[in-house]
Amino acid sequence: MQPLTGLDEQGFNKFERRSKLPPGVREQCARLDMELPRLKAVEQQAKGQGDKDDVAKALFRARSRYHEMKC
């Protein structure tokens, strides 16, 4: 039997947690959901220490924002 929402347990928990957030914060969380994997991939592909440091800082800021908003 499959859940009516079509979400797995992790997805449902995320949905339930975010349903209590204001709409603007939910939108930012959704954007961060797409941005975090992209930044992680860019970090892995970055060449040179300067590039890696810049991307690592951006990734850290995005993750911090994700946790601050309780996404």
Image (cartoon, rainbow, N blue to C red):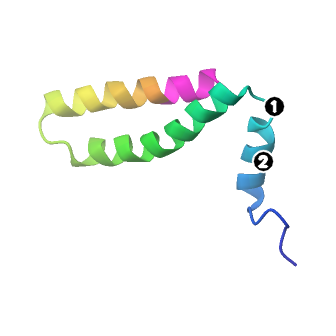
Taking the image as shown, residue 57 lies to the left or right of residue 18, namely left
Q: Quadrant of residue 52?
A: top left
Amino acid at dot 1: Lys
Dividing the image into 4 quarters, which one contains the N terminus? bottom right
Nearer to us in this view, 7 or 53: 7
Where residue 59 sits: x, y (%)?
A: 39, 31
Where residue 14 sits: x, y (%)?
A: 72, 45
| Mark 1 crowd level (few <14, some 14–19, many ≥20, 10 Å Cα) | few
Question: Where 65 sits versus 17, above or below?
Answer: above
Residue at 19% from the left image edge and 42% from the top image edge: 46
Dividing the image into 4 quarters, which one contains the C terminus? top right
Q: Is residue 71 in sight in this rendering? A: no
Residue at 52% from the left image edge and 23% from the top image edge: 64
Can you tell which mark lies on residue 13?
2
Q: Secondary structure at mark 2?
A: helix
Amino acid at dot 2: Asn
* Magenta-colored segment: predominant secondary structure: helix
Residue at 53% from the left image edge and 43% from the top image edge: 33
Magenta extent: 63-71
Q: Is residue 13 in sight in this rendering? A: yes
| Magenta region includes residue 36 | no
Question: Where 51 sits versus 35, above or below?
Answer: above
